[in-house]
Image: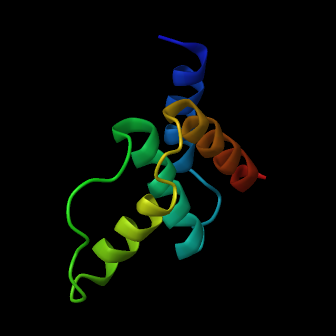
Amino acid sequence: MSALKKKFEAAVADSKKLPERPSNDVLLQLYALYKQATDGDVEGKRPGFTDMVGRAKYDAWAAIKGTAGDAAMKSYIDLVNSLKG
């Protein structure tokens, strides 16, 4: 396993133990970066207007479409580290 992948997995674990809950915008950023790093570009249809949470998640993920997996991992790690203080 690469060093980046190990740091990413450690950041994922750390994200579950943050001192305080991040804002919804930051949570969406974390979600989008995680999905981009693990699954690649968003696919499928955008959820309908009745699924507000699903729609917000889809939009956040779609906003970083085209970002390389390694770049998304680095951004995720940096974001989690900034939240840890």
- For the view shown, which residue lies furthest in the front direction? 66
- For the view shown, which residue lies furthest in the bottom direction? 50
> Is 52 drawn above or below residue 12 in the view shown?
below
Residue at image position (54%, 48%) is 15
- Number of marks in the rendered image: 0
Please say whether residue 16 is visible from this viewpoint.
no
The image's colour scheme reads rainbow
Residue at image position (31%, 83%) is 52
Give the percent coordinates (x, y) of residue 40.
38, 40
Please say whether residue 1 is visible from this viewpoint.
yes
> In the figure, is residue 8 to the left or right of 61?
right
- For the view shown, which residue lies furthest in the right direction? 85
> In the figure, is residue 63 to the left or right of 80?
left
Residue at image position (45%, 56%) is 31
> Is 41 drawn above or below residue 56 in the view shown?
above
> In the figure, is residue 23 to the left or right of 16?
right
Give the percent coordinates (x, y) of residue 41.
37, 47
The quadrant holding residue 22 is bottom right
User: Foreground: 11 or 30?
Assistant: 30
The quadrant holding residue 59 is bottom left
Give the percent coordinates (x, y) of residue 71.
60, 36
- For the view shown, which residue lies furthest in the top direction? 1
Give the percent coordinates (x, y) of residue 33.
51, 49
Residue at image position (71%, 50%) is 84
> Is 9 drawn above or below residue 63 in the view shown?
above
